Image (spheres, rainbow, N blue to C red):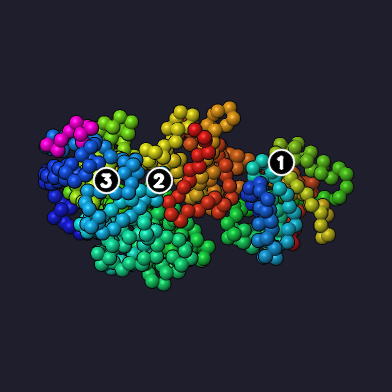
Amino acid sequence: MYWNPAIERLSAKELEEIQERRLRALVNTVYNYSPFYRKRFKEAGIHPSDIKSLSDLPKLPFTKKQDLRDTYPFGMFCVPLSQVVRFHASSGTTGKPTVVGYTANDIRNWVESLCRALASCGVSNDDIMQIAYGYGLFTGGLGFHYAAERLGATVLPISAGNTARQIELMKDLGSTVIACTPSYMIYLAEYASQMGVDIAEDTNLRAGIFGAEPWSEETRKRIEEKTGITAYDVYGTSELSGPLFTECTERSGIHVWADMFLVEIIDPKTGEQVGEGEKGELVVTTLTKEALPLIRWRTGDITYIENDKCGCGRTHPRIMRILGRADDMLIIRGVNVFPSQIEHVLMQIPEVGEHYMIIVDRREDGLDELTVQVELSEKAEIDTTGDILRLEKKIAEKLKSVLNVWAKVEVVNPGTLQRFEGKAKRVIDKRKI
Amino acid sequence: MIKQISVFVENKPGRLAAVTEVLTKHDINIRAFTIADAGDFGIIRMVVDKTDEAYKALKEAGFTVRLTDVLAVEVEDKPGALHRIAKALGDAGVNIDYVYAFTSEKHKALIIFRVNNKEKAKEVLENLGVLFKGEIS
């Protein structure tokens, strides 16, 4: 299903022409209307006239989260507040909060982007969409709300939390699609079975759109097995607008609308573009944003890009599953460890449940210690203490083979680790560095 | 052979009470009981009167539960009784994984065994005439 078939199927060449035209306009606009960008351009020794084609992109300076913090609240805005119709503020997961602003056109384009995405994963006016992302300053709730309404779906704006009510309304109103964080979906399914509700049998739910935190293919499989729904990945950040892109029904990557956003992958250490198909940090240039245009925005998300035409017929590039965040990376005894790698290993072990915690501490002798706590799954059968020790050893060995670091594994009772209603915070770093 | 229930518990205050609360609520009587401890966690093993009901109730309460076939022998409550059995099993090359004992009004002393070779052990115990073939109630 297409929302905007003419645009979604443009040839690579036509998309490039649009990108080039919009990029040239963008650098002129920010240079003329934003003291912040003018200063940045001057420091980098470049002028808008130096940007003639897409190949000139690497000449432009990066922008990052710290710039938004440094210029808080409005220093990077490129329009007067009289043209701004809405603010959102980021959750501040990794630092001080930041504020973003939208013109009426920005809201329209945001809705357009997410409408294309929702249509691509089969959401239509026949659906009842339960929006269990937080409403308010977080972009998740309102972002999905406006797009789902524009699409003609019936919106249930329940926001996050209040799990018993979520399940009750899901059943009574017949929600067919849910949007929330993957960790909340797991919690919701668990809670439902405690209430005696089998999501697969007792509800009409058929699809879920999950994001706002990194998650793995294995988690997808578990959600699907437990609930009988099809799980789609969504990508977006508040700085880029909010939730913007999802997987299509092919589920092999997330389409980024190239007429609106220009994506690159760079090596986070050197800032150089990496070769095609290589992993690195996702960098996005917004081509249509007015209030807060971003040039070469460092998302901090690690992924790679697939440019081939997708099986769904769309020509826009796909970013593959987010492998982690450049700033989530833990350095343990000098080895780079992404929490997503740990999740990947754990979810392949049938005796391990969906919930886990990662604790990093520094021992008195100065060595880092990685502890992974896991809950036993329903499939675990334990009769002797040896069964547990063998399981802990098996998990530790699998982690070692992927991470190259030994972890201390602690098996705990099901239902005892912390549950999260919003973004899961599964890493506790106790080191004082 | 009789069924034993094993429950995995973390070694923390209140964990045993969480298990016994479920059993109490379902009016289940514990016949034999032991905890194997290994630092951060322990395994509760027990023989109860209503095994299937206890298994279901604990599973629904979210515990990691397992049913295991174990052997029970009934012996006179007097010196040398356990030795006779342990020696016979040892001589037959059967390894005992764990063992615990209890007495009750209805039975003589009952000893619960988990072994590495159930069939062989059964044969040895039957020959000695000590294998318990009744029902635990």
Q: Which residue corresponds to mark 2? A: A96
Q: Crowding near pointer 1: few (<14 within 10 Å), some, many (20+)? A: some
Q: Which residue corresponds to mark 3? A: A76
Query: Is B27 part of what is drawn in magenta?
Result: no
Magenta stretch in the rendered image: A41-49
Rendered residue at 68%/60% (across/down): B21
What secondary structure is marked by label 3? loop
Could you say which disc has been placed on residue B96 in the image? 1
Taking depth in this image into account, of B125 and B25 the one nearest to the observer is: B25
Quarter of the image for residue A58 reads top left
What subunit carries mark 1? B
Taking depth in this image into account, of A105 and A207 the one nearest to the observer is: A105
- Quote the CA–CA distance across marks 2 and 1: 60 Å
- Quote the CA–CA distance across marks 2 and 3: 16 Å
Q: Earlier in the sequence, mark 2 or mark 3?
A: 3
Query: Is A44 part of what is drawn in magenta?
Result: yes
Rendered residue at 51%/66% (across/down): A196
Quarter of the image for residue A330 reads top left
Q: Percent x, y for residue A115?
A: 24, 59
With respect to residue A431, does A160 lie above or below? Answer: below
With respect to residue A178, does A11 lie above or below? Answer: above
Amino acid type, mark 3: Met
Labels 2, 1: one chain = no
Q: Crowding near pointer 3: few (<14 within 10 Å), some, many (20+)? A: many
